[in-house]
Amino acid sequence: MQQVPTLEIDGHTLTQSLPIIEYLEERSPEPPLLPKDIFGRAQVRAISEVVNSGIQPLQNLSVLEKIGDGKEEWAKFFLEKGLKALEAMLENTAGQYCYGDSVTMADLFLVPQLYNAKRFKVDMTGYPIINRIHDALVQLPAFKAADASQQPDTPEEMKST
Protein backbone atom coordinates (compact mmCIF):
# COMPACT_ATOMS: atom_id res chain seq x y z
CA MET A 1 0.00 0.00 0.00
CA GLN A 2 3.10 2.20 0.05
CA GLN A 3 2.47 3.21 3.65
CA VAL A 4 4.48 3.37 6.83
CA PRO A 5 5.26 1.78 9.17
CA THR A 6 7.40 -1.02 7.85
CA LEU A 7 9.79 -2.89 10.13
CA GLU A 8 12.60 -5.12 8.94
CA ILE A 9 13.45 -7.50 11.78
CA ASP A 10 14.71 -11.04 12.23
CA GLY A 11 14.99 -11.46 8.45
CA HIS A 12 11.35 -10.48 7.93
CA THR A 13 9.55 -7.40 6.68
CA LEU A 14 6.47 -6.50 8.69
CA THR A 15 3.89 -3.84 7.83
CA GLN A 16 1.01 -2.14 9.67
CA SER A 17 1.21 -0.92 13.26
CA LEU A 18 -0.85 -3.56 15.01
CA PRO A 19 0.95 -6.64 13.65
CA ILE A 20 4.32 -4.95 14.24
CA ILE A 21 3.46 -4.20 17.87
CA GLU A 22 2.07 -7.68 18.47
CA TYR A 23 5.16 -9.25 16.86
CA LEU A 24 7.40 -7.20 19.15
CA GLU A 25 5.24 -8.16 22.14
CA GLU A 26 5.57 -11.87 21.35
CA ARG A 27 9.28 -11.58 20.51
CA SER A 28 10.17 -9.64 23.65
CA PRO A 29 7.36 -10.08 26.18
CA GLU A 30 9.06 -8.12 28.97
CA PRO A 31 7.88 -5.61 29.79
CA PRO A 32 4.47 -6.75 28.56
CA LEU A 33 2.41 -4.47 26.30
CA LEU A 34 -0.75 -6.45 27.00
CA PRO A 35 -2.23 -7.27 30.41
CA LYS A 36 -2.11 -10.88 31.60
CA ASP A 37 -5.89 -11.27 31.93
CA ILE A 38 -8.03 -11.93 28.87
CA PHE A 39 -10.50 -9.09 29.55
CA GLY A 40 -7.66 -6.61 30.07
CA ARG A 41 -6.09 -7.65 26.76
CA ALA A 42 -9.44 -7.13 25.04
CA GLN A 43 -9.77 -3.67 26.62
CA VAL A 44 -6.27 -2.63 25.53
CA ARG A 45 -6.91 -3.89 22.02
CA ALA A 46 -10.22 -1.99 21.87
CA ILE A 47 -8.55 1.27 22.95
CA SER A 48 -5.80 0.66 20.40
CA GLU A 49 -8.31 0.02 17.63
CA VAL A 50 -10.24 3.23 18.30
CA VAL A 51 -7.03 4.99 17.27
CA ASN A 52 -5.70 2.48 14.75
CA SER A 53 -8.86 2.06 12.70
CA GLY A 54 -11.18 4.83 13.87
CA ILE A 55 -8.97 7.92 13.97
CA GLN A 56 -5.58 7.50 12.33
CA PRO A 57 -6.51 6.26 8.82
CA LEU A 58 -8.74 9.27 8.25
CA GLN A 59 -5.71 11.56 8.64
CA ASN A 60 -3.42 9.77 6.18
CA LEU A 61 -2.00 12.06 3.55
CA SER A 62 -3.47 9.94 0.73
CA VAL A 63 -6.95 10.29 2.27
CA LEU A 64 -6.60 14.02 2.86
CA GLU A 65 -5.41 14.58 -0.71
CA LYS A 66 -8.59 12.90 -1.98
CA ILE A 67 -10.73 15.17 0.22
CA GLY A 68 -9.11 18.28 -1.23
CA ASP A 69 -10.71 21.49 0.01
CA GLY A 70 -11.97 21.04 3.54
CA LYS A 71 -9.41 18.40 4.45
CA GLU A 72 -8.46 20.21 7.68
CA GLU A 73 -12.10 20.25 8.82
CA TRP A 74 -12.45 16.58 7.83
CA ALA A 75 -9.38 15.58 9.85
CA LYS A 76 -10.41 17.70 12.83
CA PHE A 77 -13.95 16.26 12.83
CA PHE A 78 -12.76 12.65 12.94
CA LEU A 79 -10.04 13.42 15.46
CA GLU A 80 -12.59 15.02 17.79
CA LYS A 81 -15.06 12.17 17.30
CA GLY A 82 -12.40 9.58 18.05
CA LEU A 83 -10.90 11.47 21.00
CA LYS A 84 -14.37 11.82 22.54
CA ALA A 85 -14.89 8.04 22.31
CA LEU A 86 -11.39 7.42 23.62
CA GLU A 87 -11.89 9.75 26.60
CA ALA A 88 -15.09 7.87 27.50
CA MET A 89 -13.31 4.51 27.32
CA LEU A 90 -10.42 5.77 29.44
CA GLU A 91 -12.83 6.82 32.18
CA ASN A 92 -13.20 3.08 32.85
CA THR A 93 -9.67 1.85 32.20
CA ALA A 94 -7.11 4.54 32.94
CA GLY A 95 -4.71 4.61 35.80
CA GLN A 96 -1.47 6.42 35.21
CA TYR A 97 -1.70 5.26 31.58
CA CYS A 98 -4.47 4.10 29.23
CA TYR A 99 -4.97 0.81 31.04
CA GLY A 100 -3.90 0.89 34.64
CA ASP A 101 -0.43 1.86 35.74
CA SER A 102 1.69 0.02 33.18
CA VAL A 103 2.44 1.13 29.63
CA THR A 104 0.45 -0.96 27.17
CA MET A 105 -0.06 -1.17 23.44
CA ALA A 106 -2.86 1.39 23.79
CA ASP A 107 -0.37 4.01 24.98
CA LEU A 108 1.77 3.42 21.89
CA PHE A 109 -1.21 4.31 19.70
CA LEU A 110 -2.26 7.33 21.76
CA VAL A 111 0.84 9.54 21.63
CA PRO A 112 1.07 10.07 17.84
CA GLN A 113 -2.59 11.07 17.67
CA LEU A 114 -1.99 14.05 19.92
CA TYR A 115 0.64 15.25 17.47
CA ASN A 116 -2.10 15.17 14.84
CA ALA A 117 -4.57 16.86 17.17
CA LYS A 118 -2.12 19.74 17.53
CA ARG A 119 -1.50 19.75 13.78
CA PHE A 120 -5.23 20.12 13.08
CA LYS A 121 -5.82 22.58 15.94
CA VAL A 122 -8.12 20.38 18.02
CA ASP A 123 -9.10 22.04 21.30
CA MET A 124 -7.83 19.48 23.82
CA THR A 125 -9.42 21.02 26.91
CA GLY A 126 -12.31 18.54 26.77
CA TYR A 127 -10.01 15.54 27.11
CA PRO A 128 -8.43 15.72 30.57
CA ILE A 129 -7.69 12.00 30.88
CA ILE A 130 -6.05 11.85 27.46
CA ASN A 131 -3.98 14.94 28.25
CA ARG A 132 -2.86 13.57 31.62
CA ILE A 133 -1.86 10.21 30.13
CA HIS A 134 -0.06 11.85 27.21
CA ASP A 135 1.88 14.16 29.51
CA ALA A 136 3.02 11.20 31.62
CA LEU A 137 3.98 9.10 28.60
CA VAL A 138 6.11 11.71 26.85
CA GLN A 139 8.27 11.97 29.97
CA LEU A 140 9.30 8.31 29.71
CA PRO A 141 12.75 7.68 28.17
CA ALA A 142 11.41 5.23 25.56
CA PHE A 143 8.82 7.72 24.34
CA LYS A 144 11.39 10.52 24.23
CA ALA A 145 13.72 8.33 22.16
CA ALA A 146 10.90 7.30 19.80
CA ASP A 147 9.70 10.87 19.15
CA ALA A 148 9.78 11.65 15.44
CA SER A 149 11.86 14.76 16.04
CA GLN A 150 14.62 12.58 17.52
CA GLN A 151 15.02 10.27 14.54
CA PRO A 152 18.16 10.56 12.40
CA ASP A 153 16.18 11.07 9.18
CA THR A 154 13.98 13.86 10.55
CA PRO A 155 14.48 17.09 8.58
CA GLU A 156 16.25 19.75 10.67
CA GLU A 157 13.28 22.16 10.51
CA MET A 158 11.12 19.50 12.22
CA LYS A 159 13.54 18.67 15.03
CA SER A 160 12.68 19.92 18.50
CA THR A 161 15.06 22.30 20.14
Image (cartoon, rainbow, N blue to C red):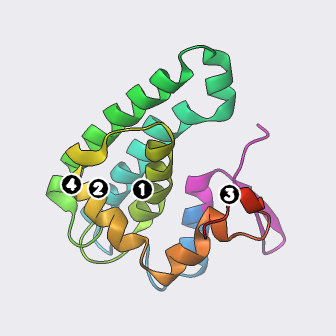
Was residue 19 drawn as part of the magenta stretch in this picture? yes
Examine the rendering and report whether any part of residue 59 can be seen: yes
2 or 1: tag closer to the N-terminus: 1
Percent across and percent down for residue 60 are 62, 35
Percent across and percent down for residue 72 are 51, 26
* Mark pair 2, 1: CA separation: 8 Å
- Range shown magenta: 1-20
Q: Nearer the viewer, mark 3 or mark 4?
A: 3
Determine crowd level at label 4: few under 14, some 14-19, many 20+ residues with C-alpha closer than 10 A: few
Report the front residue among 21 and 91: 91
* Mark pair 1, 4: CA separation: 14 Å
1 or 4: tag closer to the N-terminus: 1
Tell me the quarter of the image containing the C terminus.
bottom right
Tell me the quarter of the image containing the N terminus.
top right
Q: Residue at x 76, y 62 (%)?
A: 156
Q: Which residue is mark 2?
A: 130
- Pointers 2 and 1 in contact (C-beta within 8 Å): yes
Report the front residue among 74 and 96: 74
